[in-house]
Amino acid sequence: MEIHIVQNAERGAEVVADVFVRTLQEAGESGTVLGLATGSSPVPAYAELIRRHREEGLSFARSRAFLLDEYIGLPAGHEQSYHHFIRENFTSHIDIDDAAVVSPDGASADPVSEAASYDRRLREAGGVDLQILGIGSNGHIAFNEPGSSLGSRTRVIGLARSTIEDNARYFDTADDVPVRALSQGLGTILEARRIVLTATGAGKAEAVAQLAEGAISARWPATALQMHPDVTVVVDEAAASKLELADYYRYSRRLEAEHPLLALG
Ligand code: PGA
């Protein structure tokens, strides 16, 4: 894992945006499949990518995008649906075709079939080139709550109480938060060719420490990412505050800056 400890969310957004640009450049004419996340963590990176699109000509015209997850029971147009969120915060502000932004159908009458079909559609698209992730305070990625199988596929999952409490801020009351979601599984996410995870704030410090330095375990689902060969983690000082090896990560990033061909982590 390549861990970047940054001074603030703005600097973190630049580091994440650089990973997107590298992936888009590598794909060239053939275009990329982007894996997009909702939640507050990726929003500064999306804002930076929108800025680069507007001011520097960064183009997503050849990209397709797949969302990580969706609440069950909210129609696509609901303002708290992830279908709506990603358009509001990112894709309607760049030059990606709206029909190329795909998410699980949370209003499907048969969510179990919808989950299997979503996994299939991801595979048929050739898989995800770059997946952006946040992390829950309980260590979830997407809605893979503690206890999720490390090999899980896209499926219906019940939200943990802590997730409902964390997400209640977007709804009138905690009772309005849907209790089930369709979520890519940990095994699905691990098939992405490159992953960038971003987190800020002390509330994420324990989850970030487990992600990078904890034992791989369903107890902290994000630890599954330790098995992936190309993961960049971008955290501010508060989210990094429980990392025992923080000095080593800083040293590694300095070494890489001095020797551009090195890629440590
Ligand atoms: P947040 O959520 O980015 O809004 O903190 C992250 C998550 O729960 O995965």
Image (spheres, helix red, strand yellow):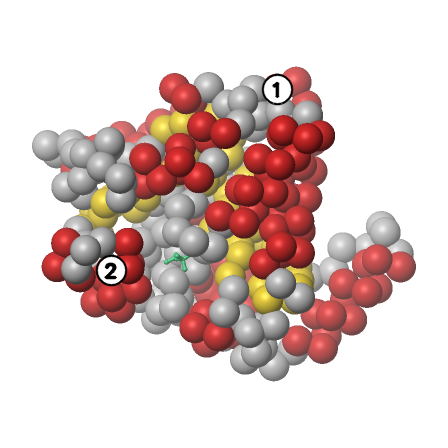
Compared across the picture, whether 82 is left or right of 190 comes to left
Q: What amino acid is labelled 2 in the image?
A: Ala
Q: Nearer the viewer, mark 2 or mark 1?
A: 2
Q: Which mark is residue 148?
A: none
Q: What amino acid is labelled 1 in the image?
A: Ser
Compared across the picture, whether 46 is left or right of 189 comes to right
Q: Secondary structure at mark 2?
A: helix
> Is 222 situated above or below 93?
below
Percent position (x, y) of residue 240?
Answer: 58, 73
Q: Residues within 10 Å of mark 1 (few under 14, many from 20)?
A: few
| Frontmost residue, 262 versus 180 | 180
Determine which quarter of the picture holds residue 120: top left
Percent position (x, y) of residue 119?
Answer: 33, 35
Q: Residues within 10 Å of mark 2 (few under 14, many from 20)?
A: some
Residue 252 visible: yes
The residue depicted at 68 percent of the width and 44 percent of the height is: 18
| Frontmost residue, 171 versus 146 | 171
* Image quadrant occupied by the C terminus: bottom right
Percent position (x, y) of residue 68?
Answer: 38, 43
Residue located beneath label 2 in the image: 168
Q: Secondary structure at mark 1?
A: helix
Q: Gap in Å between the C-alphas at discs 2 and 1?
A: 40 Å
Percent position (x, y) of residue 167?
Answer: 28, 59
| Frontmost residue, 237 versus 88 | 88
Compared across the picture, whether 217 is left or right of 78 comes to right
Give the mark nearer the N terminus: 2 vs 1. Answer: 1
> Is 233 situated above or below 92?
below
Residue located beneath label 1 in the image: 30
> Is 92 situated above or below 137?
above
